[in-house]
Structures are given as C-alpha cells and as structure tokens.
Amino acid sequence: MDIEFHEAGVSFEGRQALHPVSLALREHRIGIIGLNGSGKTTFARLINGLTKPTTGHVRVNGHDTATETQAVMAEAGFVFQVPQNQIILPILKDDIALGLKARGTLKADCEAKTFAALSRLGIEHLAHRRAHELSGGELQLAALAAVLATEPSLVILDEPTNQLDLKNRAIVTNAIASLKENVIVISHDLDLIAGFDRALLFGEGRLIEDGQPATVIDRYRTLNL
Ligand SMILES: Nc1ncnc2c1ncn2[C@@H]1O[C@H](COP(=O)(O)OP(=O)(O)OP(=O)(O)O)[C@@H](O)[C@H]1O
C-alpha cells in the first residue's frame, strides 16, 4: 500500500478542516488520534476519496483519489463510525452480497465471498440474523466483514471500539490485529493504537506529531493536561 499526500488540505465553506499536509503512508498498521474536531475523519476520508482535497492531491497506489475515485475505493474500504448506517438491508448476508454485487461481483460468487468474510471474523452464525437485532460488538464485526468481503488491500476504520464494552472492545481489537490487510484506524482507544507501526496526531486541523505510537501518545497526553 502506497499512500501519498501532496499538500492536501480540505476546507468546508471557507473553514479549514485540514491544513495542507504532505506525507507518505506505507506501514501495515497506522493509528490516527487527536481531540474531537481535530481533522482525523477528514484526513481518513481523503484516503479513499470520500472527501476530495480542496488543495493539493492524494494518491493511493498511484491512483489520484479525486479523479480515479472508483479505483481508489476498490483498494481502500471504509468502516464507518456508526455501523448501523452502513448496513442497509435487514438480513446481514443479503447486505454483504448487495455490496459485492454493486462492485461487479458475479452473483454466483457473492455467497461464497460473503461467508468467507464472515468466517474470517468468526461470525458466520450471524449471516441470517437481522442487523438491527445485533449487539454493538456483533454489528461492528459485521460492518468490518462487509468491507473485507470486497477484498480491499487497505481497511480504514473510524472509531471501531468507540461504543463497545470491554469484552467487545477486546474482540474487535483482536479482529483488527488478525487482519492481513493494511489498516488505518481512527481511535480514542489508545490501547488499540499502542501496538501499531505508526501513529499520527492531529490538533486543530493540523498534523502535529507523526512517529512511533508510544511517542505520539505521550504528546497527545500533554495536549489533554
Ligand atoms: N461535511 C462537513 N461540512 C462542514 N464542516 C465539516 C464537515 N466535515 C467536517 N467538518 C468540520 O471539520 C472539522 C474537522 O472534523 P473531523 O470530523 O475531521 O474531526 P475529527 O477529529 O474526526 O472529530 P471527532 O473525533 O469528533 O470525530 C470540524 O470542525 C468539523 O465540524
């Protein structure tokens, strides 16, 4: 995975949500931390083309996120902060299959890919369940399975353990640790980020620290004093 930001910045209605930033991301697991409203989600959405830069550009494996958005989205899957908003059809397996069909997967292959993704996370027993009846932890894993089914090389997760109790937090943390795909995780859960290969700290729309998680987390703690 090769992600390059070249002076990429975002403003909404004249307000700078993310000041221009240049960097390359190539590590297997990268954590993004920072206070509320500091630009973390805006930065992450730039990576798979959900948000387009208002200045500069972002490239994912050579594809420009603004002009080759479909190619970028095929490489980079996004698990949203509220999984309820991601799963649309009532029955989980139907929802995952719908996402696959939308990406051009042959109907005959959808079922196998759906069950392969569910079983990777140990939740194939949820396939026929109604999404709105799932627990918070089950729903988070289901949303991750839906993205994994599309076979991206990078998975971006926006606060995946945010609303979970300790037990489900551990289940989701272990599921993320087991992924062979590259992962970029936005989180306030510093334990989740601590074992990653790199961390980025945002503050007031700027990248203010970038490096080993232990160092970056220490800096974050000083901001909260
Ligand atoms: N679509 C949008 N339209 C207008 N302003 C936006 C939009 N998306 C984000 N912003 C603003 O940009 C700034 C950064 O928001 P962003 O969601 O990136 O922060 P964040 O660090 O992910 O916050 P949180 O931890 O609360 O999720 C905020 O001031 C937010 O209000």
Image (cartoon, rainbow, N blue to C red):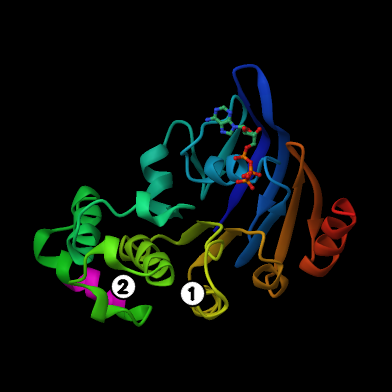
| Residue at (28% x, 60% y) in the render | 132
User: What amino acid type is highlighted by mark number 1?
Assistant: Lys
Residue corresponding to mark 1: 180
173, above or below 143, in the image: below
| Residue at (72% x, 72% y) in the render | 194
99, above or below 140, in the image: above
Q: Position of residue 54 (x, y in %)?
A: 59, 24
Quadrant location of ligand 1?
Answer: top right
Q: Is residue 166 left or right of residue 15?
A: left
Q: In this picture, which residue range is highlighted in magenta?
A: 112-118
Q: Nearer the viewer, residue 64 or 144?
A: 144
Mark 1, secondary structure of its residue: loop
Visible in this render: residue 27?
no
Q: Choose top left, top right, bottom left or bottom right for residue 125.
A: bottom left
| Residue at (69% x, 75% y) in the render | 195
Tell me how far mark 1 sits from mark 2, CA to CA.
13 Å
| Residue furthest left as drawn | 108
| Residue at (90% x, 56% y) in the render | 222
Q: Is residue 115 magenta?
A: yes
Disc marking residue 161: none
Q: Position of residue 162 (x, y in %)?
A: 56, 61
Q: Main secondary structure of the magenta part?
A: helix
Q: Choose top left, top right, bottom left or bottom right for residue 5.
A: top right
Q: Residues within 10 Å of mark 1 (few under 14, many from 20)?
A: few
Q: Position of residue 76 (x, y in %)?
A: 45, 53
Which mark sits nearer the N-terminus, 1 or 2? 2
Q: Is residue 116 magenta?
A: yes
41, above or below 148, in the image: above
Q: Residues within 10 Å of mark 2 (few under 14, many from 20)?
A: many
- Quadrant of image for the N terminus: bottom right
Q: Is residue 88 left or right of residue 43?
A: left
Residue corresponding to mark 2: 117
